[in-house]
Amino acid sequence: MTRPAFNCKGQWSHTPLISVCFTYISNELNVYNFTTEHHHSWSSHKGIFIINYDGILLTAPLYLIIVTVVTGRKVRLFHFLFEMLENVGMAHCVSWVPAAADGVFRFSSRNKEQVAALWGQRKGNRRPMTYQKMSRALRNYARSGEIFKVKKKLTYQFSRATLSVHLQYFNLVYVNF
């Protein structure tokens, strides 16, 4: 069976949700229009769909969405960080470290609290998330081997396994027109 083609404008599409209607492709290849009414709801069907956060439609790496749908789990912090790192608009808060090894990223010392606040909103916390709390969660990822602390200030690294899964699914799922 061939993979369904998913048409997105470029690899990363950041489009205001209000005037846009995107497509949901289920395992049965039925097409479903994803509109503003459904922007925070999760479909009970397994498949590929677009997630909206904070009024912006993000076509994140689709494997993150597939994993979320199949397992029924919420998006985890390292999934959120992948999205933020690939979002050009968030480069002032978190960015890849170009001269370092693969998977190394750094938080901006000025805007690290903004990333933490967005993560708290994404989780649905009533109280604002602080960078201190988010960094504790990042340190806990070292136990599972997904993210490691680098000995530089505000710098972390995705494990090779986490990074390779991200890149593998990113390359397999996207078909650009």
Image (tube, rainbow, N blue to C red):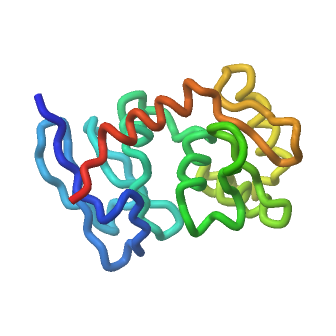
Q: Position of residue 154 (x, y in %)?
A: 83, 48
Q: Measured along the vertical axis of the image, is residue 8 above or below residue 42?
A: below
- Residue at x-position 11% and y-position 28%: 1
Along the line of sight, the residue nearer the viewer: 171 or 40: 171
Image-based side of 117 in relation to 19, left or right: right
Image-based side of 109 in relation to 162, left or right: right
- Residue extending farthest front: 99
Image-based side of 76 in relation to 24, left or right: right
Q: Position of residue 152 (x, y in %)?
A: 87, 43
- Residue at x-position 26% and y-position 60%: 34
- Residue at x-position 59% and y-position 27%: 160
Residue 139 appears in which quarter of the rendering?
A: top right
Residue 144 appears in which quarter of the rendering?
A: top right
Image-based side of 24 in relation to 155, left or right: left
Q: Measured along the vertical axis of the image, is residue 118 above or below residue 46?
A: below
Residue 46 appears in which quarter of the rendering?
A: top left
- Residue at x-position 85% and y-position 60%: 109
Q: Position of residue 146 (x, y in %)?
A: 64, 27
